[in-house]
Every structure is written in C-alpha cells, then in structure tokens.
Amino acid sequence: EKNRLMNEALGEINGLYDALDRDLIEARGLQQSLVRERFRDFGSAKVSLLLRPCGHVGGDLVGFFPISKSMIGLFSIDVSGHGIASAMITARMASYFSGSTADQNIGLMCDENGKISARSASLVAARLNDILLSEMHTEHYLTMGLAVLNTQTGEMVMAQCGHPYSVIQRAAGKIELSGTGGLPIGLIPGAEWVDHTITLAPGDRILIASDGISECPDRNGNLLGDEGVIKLMRRNAHLSGNAFFETIMWDLTSFAGDKPFPDDISAVLLEYQGPSEAQ
C-alpha cells in the first residue's frame, strides 16, 4: 500500500514537472521573441545581437532602436538572478524600449515641435532606477550599457550602469576598454549616472556584453576576464556579425569544457562603417 501511494505521488510530481517544463519552454520562446531582429544593416553601421540564456529563461536582454536617419540607440541589460522572476523583469524592460515614439520608448524624447531625439543615456538610467524602486517592488536589480550612436560622425554617447566595460576594436587592430563604471540600477534611490563619449572611425567596432562572457569559468573555475574577452576579439577580428557571435560561442564552450554556462550570455556588436557618399 505504501509503494502504491508513493508511486501515485511520484506520478503526480512528474506530471507537475512536465507541465512546468512545457510552460518554461513556451516562456523561452516568448522571451526570445523580445529580440525581434538579431541583425540589421543601417548602411553606416551594422548591429548584431547575441542572447543565450543559461536555463529555459534568463535575465539578459539586448536590442537596438532607430531614433532618426542618423541616430541609433543600443542597449544591453542584465537583471540579477536567474529564472522566472528575472525573465519577467526583462520583459518589463523590453516594453520600455519597444516603441518608436517618445511615449512608447524611454530612450526617446519629443520637443515642442514634435521632433524625436535621443534622451540622455544617464537620464534614462535614472528613470529606470526610479521605476524599479518605486513601481516594481522587487529585490532584483540590473546592470546596463546604453548608447546612442550618430552614424554620420561616429560619436557614441554612452552610460555604463554596473555593466562590464565595452570593448572597442579599432580598424588598425588596437583594442581598448571603455567606460566609467557606475552603479547598477535599482539599488539606491536618487542614484546618478554620467555619460561618456566614444568616437568611432570607419572600420571600428564595439562590443557591449553582459558579464556572462567575461565571468565564464573554465574547468578549474578560473574566469575568462577582460583579457580573455580581448583575446577572443583579436582572434576573431576577421569575422563579422552573426558569424562572429557563433564563433565566440564555440570559443566559450571550448573554454568552459564540459560544464554548462552558469550565467546568461548576451552582447551587442556594432560595426561602424561610416557614412556613404549618398548619405
């Protein structure tokens, strides 16, 4: 009788796990759909996106949004923790960057004449900080890299909010880290961030990635680190777009050995080509 009861209970538990697994698989598909485009060629610049959660769902989000004929917005977000709660916050964050008007996209603003322009990245961070603390009532926080690129001049204005430093690879091969640090979003009321400016020349590119890459561990628990990311950039300098990301994933898999990735992996790669004569 005890065996029968145990088998019945085990069957019920397995049924619940199967239902939960089906829900999580569907949730993964819905989360992946938040990144509608993985690549776009703007003519003056190419933008490629990488998003690989470590579980069914994750807390990372990447994307871009056109602002005007010569302005592009880019963002990379990493919500603390893993699983369903983090994924729900990323879905909320996606809604703030989804539209093309100022009332739909927190990265845009509209002047009295109705002209759309970019809101300062540091001000966007401050607004998201207020929303996370006053409206969402969660213990989770997030890191973010948010940038606005002028495709005509190559000037990029960016705010770093606890996110890893961006990696710039110049056309001549030199690689440098860029950023000011900054606090994560959702920790301290009234926190402030600063904008910093990066100037890209034709042939330069920049990688804005979550710490899932730099903090990827090898078999012995040693992290890849910033130097490891630089080596990957240098080794794959000849690759572009999605081919670059696919090779990066192969390299990370080889580095990690037989261990699964402990964190979500996401990144934005912007390859600046400079304005064409027609533009």
Image: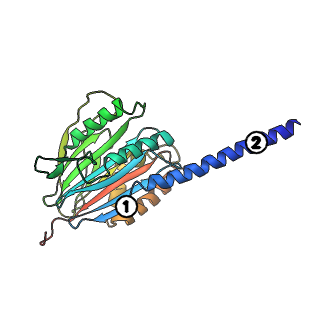
Q: Which residue is mark 1?
A: 38
Q: Position of residue 131 (x, y in %)?
A: 32, 35
Q: Nearer the viewer, mark 2 or mark 1?
A: 2
Toward the top, the furthest residue is 189
Residue plotted at (26% across, 54% down)? 100
Q: Position of residue 23 (x, y in %)?
A: 57, 49
Q: Give the vertical position of 265 relative to 42 (above or below).
A: above
Q: Give the vertical position of 106 relative to 51 (above or below).
A: above
The secondary structure type at the circle numbered 1 is loop
Q: Position of residue 62 (x, y in %)?
A: 36, 51
Q: Which mark is residue 10?
A: 2
Residue 159 sits in which quadrant? top left
**Mark 1: few/some/many CA within 10 Å (<14, 14-19, 20+):** some
Quadrant in which the N terminus appears: top right
Q: Amino acid at mark 2?
A: Leu
Nearer to me, 182 or 255: 182
Residue plotted at (27% across, 55% down)? 65
8 sits left or right of 211 in the view: right
Toward the right, the furthest residue is 1
Q: Amino acid at mark 1?
A: Arg
Q: Which mark is residue 152?
A: none
Nearer to me, 168 or 43: 43
4 sits left or right of 33 in the view: right
The secondary structure type at the circle numbered 2 is helix
Q: Name the N-terminal-most of marks 2 and 1.
A: 2
Nearer to me, 233 or 65: 65
